Structure formats: C-alpha cells, structure tokens
Amino acid sequence: QVQLVESGGGLVQAGGSLRLSCAASGIPFRIYVMGWYRQAPGKQRELVARITRDRMTNYADSVKGRFTISRDNGQSTVYLEMNSLKPDDTAVYYCNAVGLTSAHDYWGQGTQVTVSS
C-alpha cells in the first residue's frame, strides 16, 4: 500500500519560514520523481517544486529563490523548505510521487499552510 504522509504545515507570519516533509512508503522511492503542489481556495492545484531521481529541480516562478526542495532517499522523504513566506503562499500543500509510468502517480492527503499578514 502506497502512503505519502505530509507534515510541517501550520500558521506563520509573513516573512517567516516553514519546512514541510513528506514520508513515503510502499514505493521504490529513489526512482520516483517527487513534487510539491498547492491549492488555494477557489484556485486550481499548481506545481510548486519538483525533484527528479537525479536531484534535478524546478520551481514555480512565484517561489524561486524562496523555496527549496530536497530529498533523502535513505529516509524515503522529500522536503520543502519555505522561506520569506507571503500571504499568497497560503494553501493546502500536497506531496506527489510519480514513477516510471502514468499508472504510478500518488498523492498525499495535504497539509495546510497559512501565512498571515
């Protein structure tokens, strides 16, 4: 059974920092592309950051220079370090794991991040 369990969300003031974690189980983690997405109320889910099995990364323009994605294959965990948070970063953040085929596409339950002004 595949599980992606996010943690680390919460309420923070603008300018603050949070670190999200996503612990994966039931998949060969090291070969999966891991990503963080977010969905704000009334908006579509959007990609925040992604890291490949070779640790290549890409980011949404809105978070470049503020967020950092990383992975620990030994712990089967992907992280999202979020700095200089803004109220516009408020959303539910979801962890995503994509394997070698489209059938291997999994989501976590989400963790709420709220940034107050």
Image (cartoon, grey):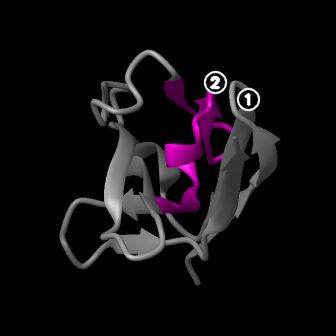
Residue 116 x/y as whole percent? 72, 46
Front-lying residue, 94 or 104:
94
Label 2 crowd bin: few (<14), some (14–19), many (20+), radius 10 Å = some
Q: Which residue is mark 2?
A: 83
Above or below residue 3? Residue 14 is above
The alpha-carbon separation of the residues under discs 1 and 2 comes to 4 Å
Helix, strand or loop under label 2: loop
Helix, strand or loop under label 1: loop
Q: Are marks 1 and 2 in contact (CB under 8 Å)?
A: yes
Mark seen at residue 17: 1
Above or below residue 54? Residue 52 is below
Above or below residue 114? Residue 63 is above
Front-lying residue, 73 or 45:
45
Mark seen at residue 77: none
| Position of residue 85 in the picture relative to residue 68 (left or right) | right
Residue 114: image quadrant is bottom right
| Position of residue 100 in the picture relative to residue 36 (left or right) | left
Q: Quadrant of the N terminus?
A: bottom right
Is residue 76 part of the magenta span, yes or no? yes
- What residue sits 80% from the left and 51% below the top? 11
Asked whether residue 75 appears in the rendered view, the answer is: no
Residue 57: image quadrant is top left
Q: Residue furthest front?
A: 117
Residue 103 x/y as whole percent? 24, 79
